[in-house]
Amino acid sequence: MALDLVGKVIKKLPVQSGTSARGDWSKQEFIIETQENFPRKICMNVWGSEKVEELSKFKDGENLKISVNIESREFNNRWYTDIRAWKIDRLEDGGSNIQSVDPMNSPVDFPSGDAGEDDLPF
């Protein structure tokens, strides 16, 4: 599942690294705050030294557009969800380039009937 999120970088957590059977690895988690009526904080991560280096170019407080994949996996009868960023772009205007529509607060267009005709259907 691929999604695009827009938000402000709140905090970058320390880089984690190690060695597995497939070689060296590194990852870094970071927190963004979405730009909605009710902002949410989301923890996501980047994997690999190239992506960690790319994330280091962004400062706390910057507005970003982030493309992510969401995956879940099971381990010992417990499920873990991972939000992995695969593309990060800086928003130049400081605001959201994605327009979101709140269906609960959107005006509803009702068709207007003929004002001269006042017949009731019952």
Image (cartoon, helix red, strand yellow):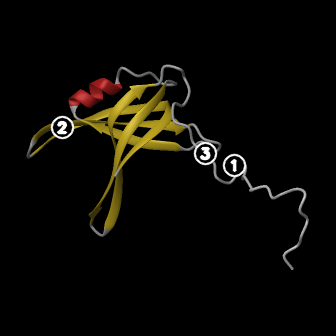
Above or below, 78 relative to 111: below
For the point 71% across and 50% down, the residue is: 105
> What's the residue type where badge 2 is placed?
Trp
Q: CA distance from mark 1 to mark 3?
A: 7 Å
> What's the residue type where badge 3 is placed?
Val
Badge number at residue 25: 2
Crowding near pointer 3: few (<14 within 10 Å), some, many (20+)?
Answer: few
Asked if residue 108 lies left or right of residue 82, the reply is right
Q: CA distance from mark 2 to mark 3?
A: 40 Å
Name the residue beneath numbered marker 3. 101
> What's the residue type where badge 1 is placed?
Ser
Q: Is 27 or 109 nearer to us in this picture?
A: 109
Mark 1 and mark 3 in contact? Answer it, CB < 8 Å: yes
Name the residue beneath numbered marker 1. 106
Percent of width and height locating residue 115: 88, 56
Instruction: Tell me which numbered mark, 1 or 2, is placed earlier along the sequence.
Output: 2
Q: Nearer the viewer, mark 2 or mark 3?
A: 3
Asked if residue 37 lies left or right of residue 82, the reply is right
